[in-house]
């Protein structure tokens, strides 16, 4: 199997068989030799920010000398991004090898495994083959019924910001969703919760008591932002002062507090994490697609904000970084999210909007979304047939002092990020054939 064949296999659903359950996934892993049983995990869930939390924790553990696996989703450009060891993505060759192994095992079962099931099994095989000391494991959706929850040897459970999402599966209230996410708690582990609504915290406290594990909740009242710019932020938290983190976006501050409390809890459980390695890792962390500046004159910014919790945070970050500025937004929104309320949050900041037609079946049609924006506001909105056309339209409309902001989907952010990077490479290399 080649890498391209592996990707096609991942993305092609087997509709001839019954959809797999968590029990089926456990059976699949047993055929593969239960690679997850040889590993220790830090299990991370939440509605927003869990990828950033994972990246920061993995960076701290790697800087502390641990061979650290990192499993996240979705990816921005290539599937390899989802599976890293010490910051290095899995190679195309190993990706194809483990896809073949999982495919062979899955064919022995009369079940249809979805993309995330397949990729998770591949990741477990890879991390086990690399003899990782610890794996930072991001939940795909929810917690209790997510396929990552087959792991048993969990050192630490981390819950980031919780908001209404996937309500048809996870529950119709924040409390119900928090309870579902707390389903990753395991006896013998410890847990960190990002401070948030009383109903979410109450549900998580009850789950921690039931599991018999200690729970630490972050204390934002003990934090102070010292400085902030478009490349980093410096803050004080509890006894730590002048903590510089190379993650822009004001919304990252709550994630940083979660990571600091998680690191201290890991230290209390025997992990050797020095203050020097922690500070060094945070000052060098890179997590693309989250309030990422790709260019200036005009400013070009991408962010993965895609739900009701993330969009207000993006708005606050934009207003802080670019006070009194209006933005040219490139966006797509999903039908199963409260997209009308998300638009109510963001449109007051809009100079104009460009909606993008994507292949995601859950996405609103670009023409319909543009029409809704025009009809519900005085904002000019146009539809683009592709990500490339959206970039062309935005650059044509923008003056040097303007800011273009992409949001609504990490896949959209990733696609446009690739376009802009290729455009910059083309500008540096006159012989390059890429045109935008």
Image (cartoon, rainbow, N blue to C red):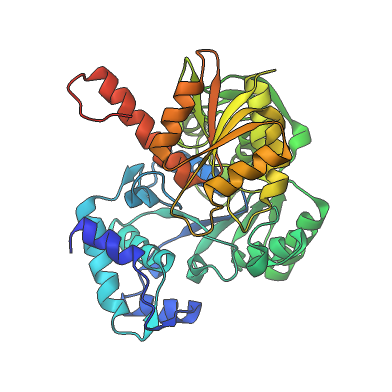
**Can residue 119 be seen in this snapshot?**
yes
Give residue 118's position: percent from left, percent from top.
Answer: 37, 67
Q: Residue furthest bottom?
A: 110
Residue 187 spot, x, y in % from top left: 61, 68
Residue placed at 28% from the left, 19% from the top? 427
Q: Position of residue 407 (x, y in %)?
A: 55, 39
Q: Viewed as shown, does residue 322 lie left or right of 39? A: right
Is residue 229 shown above or below 38? above
Instruction: Write the residue at 33% across / 23% down.
Output: 424
The percent position of residue 98, horizontal first and vertical second, equals 26, 64
Q: Which of the two residues, 303 or 25, is positioned nearer the viewer here?
A: 303
Quarter containing the N terminus = bottom left
| Quadrant in which the C terminus is drawn | top left
In the foreground, 245 or 249: 249
Q: Nearer the viewer, residue 316 or 363?
A: 363
Task: Work out which residue is located at the far right of the displayed protein and give it.
Answer: 198
């Amino acid at each position: 199997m080649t890498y391209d064949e592996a990707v096609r296999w991942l993305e092609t659903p087997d509709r001839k068989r019954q959809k797999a359950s968590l029990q089926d996934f456990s059976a699949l892993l047993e055929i593969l030799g239960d690679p997850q049983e040889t590993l220790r995990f830090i299990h991370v869930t939440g509605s927003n920010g869990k990828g950033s939390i994972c990246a920061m924790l993995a960076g701290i553990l790697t800087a502390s000398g641990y061979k650290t696996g990192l499993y996240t989703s979705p990816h921005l450009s290539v599937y390899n991004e989802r599976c890293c060891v010490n910051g290095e993505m899995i190679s195309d060759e190993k990706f194809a090898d483990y896809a073949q192994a999982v495919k062979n095992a899955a064919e022995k079962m009369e079940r249809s495994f979805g993309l995330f099931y397949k990729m998770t099994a591949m990741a477990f095989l890879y991390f086990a083959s690399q003899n990782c000391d610890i794996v930072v494991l991001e939940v795909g959706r929810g917690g209790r019924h997510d396929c990552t929850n087959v792991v048993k040897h969990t050192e630490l459970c981390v819950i980031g910001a919780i908001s209404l999402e996937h309500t048809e599966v996870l529950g119709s209230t924040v409390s119900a969703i928090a309870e579902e996410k707390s389903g990753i708690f395991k006896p013998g582990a410890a847990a960190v919760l990002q401070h948030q609504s009383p109903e979410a915290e109450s549900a998580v406290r009850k789950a921690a008591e039931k599991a018999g594990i200690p729970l630490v909740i972050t204390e934002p009242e003990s934090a102070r932002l010292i400085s902030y710019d478009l490349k980093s932020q410096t803050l004080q938290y509890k006894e730590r002062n002048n903590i510089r983190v190379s993650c822009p976006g004001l919304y990252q501050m709550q994630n940083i507090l979660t990571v600091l409390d998680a690191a201290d809890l890991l230290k209390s459980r025997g992990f050797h994490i020095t203050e020097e390695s922690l500070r060094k890792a945070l000052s060098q962390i890179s997590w693309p697609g989250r309030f990422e500046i790709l260019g200036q004159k005009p400013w070009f910014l991408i962010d993965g904000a895609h739900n009701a919790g993330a969009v207000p945070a993006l708005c606050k970050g934009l207003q802080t970084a670019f006070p009194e500025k209006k933005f040219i937004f490139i966006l797509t929104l999903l039908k199963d999210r409260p997209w009308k309320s998300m638009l109510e949050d963001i449109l007051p900041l809009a100079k104009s909007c460009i909606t993008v037609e994507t292949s995601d079946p859950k996405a609103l049609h670009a023409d319909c979304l543009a029409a809704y924006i025009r009809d519900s506001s005085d904002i000019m909105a146009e539809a683009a047939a592709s990500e490339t056309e959206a970039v062309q339209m935005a650059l044509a409309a923008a003056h040097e002092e303007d800011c273009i902001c992409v949001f609504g989907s990490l896949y959209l952010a990733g696609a446009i990020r690739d376009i802009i990077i290729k455009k910059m490479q083309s500008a540096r290399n006159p012989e390059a054939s890429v045109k935008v």
